[in-house]
């Protein structure tokens, strides 16, 4: 129905930057919201940032002022610009999309995850 393709993860030193991308494709009528979550092994998945179709954004307190979520509606793509990265940002980052599909109703979709490692 809908596929999410993430890219941009990797290894970066503390204080560095990375940009994650997530492109949605498939039977999309419209995208209600797109978000980034992250998960560390053994811990619950946590919301990092969200952007809605109305342009509203929301961030976890731990990333405010360092991360910026943005969206290209024409490309059905969401980005996460991560600056001033800290070792505690190390996690598997997942893209999520709340989608009104063509013929399949409204559903929640997840990407496969992209690893971000912050280490010297």
Image (cartoon, rainbow, N blue to C red):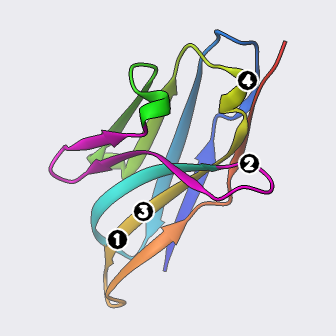
32 or 43, which is in the foreground? 43
**In the rendered image, which quarter is residue 101 located in?**
bottom left
Q: CA distance from mark 1 to mark 4?
A: 33 Å
Q: Is residue 71 magenta?
A: no
Query: Which residue carries the number 3 mark?
Result: 97
Task: Kindly report the distance in space between the C-alpha atoms of the residues bearing marks 4 and 2.
Answer: 12 Å
Give the mark toward the camera: 2 or 1: 2
Seen in the picture, residue 87 relative to 76 is either above or below; the reply is above
- Residue 57 rendering spot, x and y as whole percentages: 27, 41
Q: Is residue 31 left or right of residue 115?
A: left
Q: Which residue is mark 2?
A: 40
> Pointer 2: residues within 10 angstroms few (<14), some, or many (20+)?
some
Can you tell which quarter of the image residue 42 is in? bottom right
Q: Are marks 4 and 3 in contact (CB under 8 Å)?
A: no
The answer to whether the residues at label 3 and label 2 have Cβ atoms under 8 Å apart is no
User: In this rendering, would 27 be left or right of 118?
Assistant: left
Q: Which residue is mark 4?
A: 87
Marks 3 and 2, the one that precedes in the sequence: 2
Checking the image for residue 99, the label placed there is 1
Q: Secondary structure at mark 4?
A: helix
Boundaries of the magenta span: 39-60
Horizontal side of 39 relative to 65 (left or right) equals: right
Q: How far apart are labels 4 and 3 at the CA level? A: 27 Å
> Which mark's residue is nearer the viewer, 3 or 2?
2
| Mark 1 crowdedness (10 Å alpha carbons): few <14, some 14-19, many ≥20 | many
Q: Position of residue 27 (x, y in %)?
A: 39, 76
Instruction: Identify the residue shown where x is 53% and y is 40%.
Output: 21
Q: Mark 1 or mark 4, which has the lower sequence index?
A: 4
Label pair 3/1, CB-CB below 8 angstroms:
yes
Q: Quadrant of residue 58?
A: top left
Residue sitting nearer the eye, 103 or 37: 37
């Amino acid at each position: 129905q809908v596929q999410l393709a993430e890219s941009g993860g990797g290894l970066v030193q503390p204080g560095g930057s990375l940009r994650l991308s997530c492109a949605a494709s498939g039977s999309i009528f419209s995208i209600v919201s797109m978000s980034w979550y992250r998960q560390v092994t053994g811990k619950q998945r946590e919301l990092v940032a969200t952007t809605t179709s109305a342009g509203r954004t929301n961030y976890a307190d731990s990333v405010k002022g360092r991360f910026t979520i943005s969206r290209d509606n024409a490309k059905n793509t969401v980005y996460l610009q991560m600056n001033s990265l800290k070792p505690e940002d190390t996690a598997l980052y997942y893209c999520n999309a709340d989608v009104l599909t063509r013929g399949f109703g409204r559903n929640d979709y997840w990407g496969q995850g992209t690893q971000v490692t912050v280490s010297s």
